[in-house]
Amino acid sequence: MKSARTTRRRKIGIAIAAVVGVWLVCAAWLLGTAWYRVPRYEPGSAPTAVVSLIHGPTEYERVIETHRRPHVYTCEAASGAGAVTVFGAEHTQDPNDPQVDLIRSEWEALHPTVALIESDLGMMFPLFMDPVVTFGEPGFVHALAREDDVPTYTWEPADGVVLRRVLNDGFTLQQVALRWILGPYFSQVRHGRLADPDGFVRDTLDQRSRVFEIEGVIASMDDIEAAWQSAFPDGPDWREVSDEFGLPGFLGEMDLNRPRDEHLVSCLAALIAQGERVFVICGSSHAVKIEPAVRALCE
């Protein structure tokens, strides 16, 4: 009788160990195939003469209604080594957007050796999640890069670089913190207002508010409401604001994109000089503003 019980326990133990083993193998495989944040490319500074060619907000305003969307161009380095395709997309999270097929076509035509993407993505399980739905067109470019074993970097500068620039432009800590914390929500509203705006902002508030330059300035939803009411007593409600056609008041005057564009051009200067073939995915406005500088780098 005792031997039978021992045998039963042993069988149960073996079965449990087998289940745990299978679970661990599956978990290891799942984590091994998962996406994580992509690294930042850290270049030196591009030549001042090239950086000065980047269009500012005033120059961009002149063409905002007329430039191509998407705005796509390719240039080959005059030396014969190095090339770049800049795909300036209309941001999308629709896998059936015609831009998705066009991105693939441009990717295949360039035969890139490096991909530079807007944002640094995050964790995603490709077996269960669509990269376009999850991360938009940068996610699709990263998927293409993974298929072709091409390294992907974010062209975004460090957060502190952007914040220090706008603080040096004379905006207050509270103004900069409000713009920085609500920025992702304003961009998300381009695709339609979310069912739970407060929940979206609450989920990103902790990370966004902990950047050293603005840490502690706005730390809660109540702080956001108070800062917004102080800045815009006559409205609009921040929940109704999208950045698709500009932001109200000082939010629209704050040029967070200039240091980003300069960093992107610096990335391209370094990579083209190394003979790399670079595929860039960015918003269409970035593509328009950096085009003169990019073409100068290829001369």
Image (tube, rainbow, N blue to C red):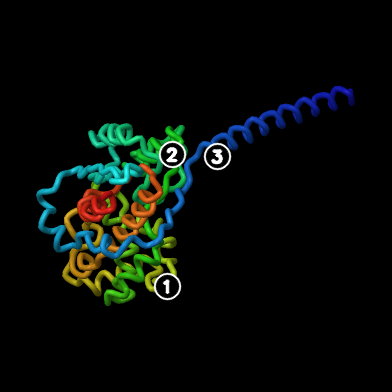
Element class at badge 3: helix
Query: Which quarter of the picture shows residue 45?
Result: bottom left
Left or right, residue 143 beside residue 12: left
Q: Residues within 10 Å of mark 2 (few under 14, many from 20)?
A: some
Residue 216 is tagged as: 1
Where is residue 7 drawn, in percent x and y?
Answer: 83, 24
Residue 94 is tagged as: none
Dot 2 and dot 3 residues touching (CB under 8 Å): no
Q: Quadrant of the N terminus?
A: top right
Q: Can you name the residue that lies furthest to the front here?
A: 79
Residue at 20% x, 68% y: name it. 253
Which of disc 1 and disc 3 is earlier in sequence? 3
Where is residue 128 drawn, in percent x and y?
Answer: 44, 34
Element class at badge 1: loop
Q: Which residue is mark 3?
A: 31
Which amino acid type corresponds to the residue marked 2 in the rendered image?
A: Val
Q: Which residue is mark 2?
A: 150
